[in-house]
Image: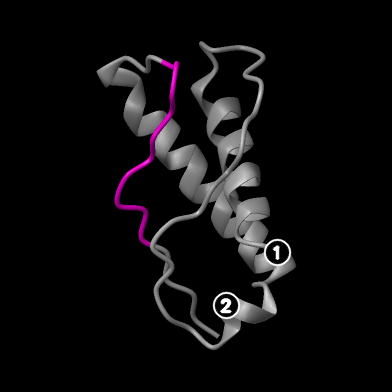
Amino acid sequence: MNINVNIERLILDGVAVPHAERPFLQAAVEAELGRLLADGGLAPSLVAGGAVPRVDGGSMAIENSSNYTQMGRDIAHAVYRGMGS
């Protein structure tokens, strides 16, 4: 099975990510979300395919706002939970 995920926009309220650090955050979100999907699969409601206009990752505490790799992993977990998986 192939899974294609396109994150058009990631909104982080109250978190300032320096422009130079954004690629690290993006790579961490993509890598961890890919791993979670490969290991845990998709929610049954998403297996048939289709677009999901919005995934609410909920609220989360950011322990170390300067560690963008860890922040990306944490965001990926929140998005995965929001997908209902």
Q: Amino acid at mark 2?
A: Leu
Is 74 displayed left or right of 72 in the figure? Answer: right
**Quick check: is 18 in the magenta stretch?**
no
Residue under pointer 1: 85
Q: Nearer the viewer, residue 57 or 7?
A: 57
Q: Estimate how packed mark 1 is, as few (under 14), some (14 to 19) or many (20 or more) residues with alpha carbons within 10 Å.
A: some
Kind of residue at badge 1: Ser
Instruction: Based on the picture, tell me whether residue 7 belongs to the magenta stretch.
Output: yes
Q: Are marks 1 and 2 in contact (CB under 8 Å)?
A: yes
* Point 49% across, 81% down: residue: 2
Mark 2 — residue?
46
Left or right: residue 39 compared with residue 3: right
User: What numbered label is drawn on residue 52?
Assistant: none
Q: Position of residue 70 (x, y in %)?
A: 60, 27
Instruction: Identify the image quadrant of the N terminus.
Output: bottom right
- Residue 33: x percent and y percent? 57, 53
- At horizontal 57% and vertical 44% (from top left) the residue drawn is 57
**Residue 80, horizontal then vertical, whole percent:** 62, 54
Secondary structure of the residue carrying numbered label 2: helix
Residue lying at 43% horizontally and 31% vertically, measured from the top left: 25
Check disc 2: other Cα within 10 Å, few if <14, some if 14-19, many if 20+.
some
Please name whichever residue, 42 or 56, is drawn nearer the observer in this view of the structure: 56
Horizontally, residue 10 falls left or right of residue 75, namely left
Which mark is first along the chain, 2 or 1?
2
Q: Secondary structure at mark 1?
A: loop
The residue drawn where x is 62% and y is 19% is: 62
Query: In the rendered structure, which segment of residues is drawn in magenta?
Result: 6-15
Q: Main secondary structure of the magenta part?
A: loop
Q: Residue furthest left?
A: 19
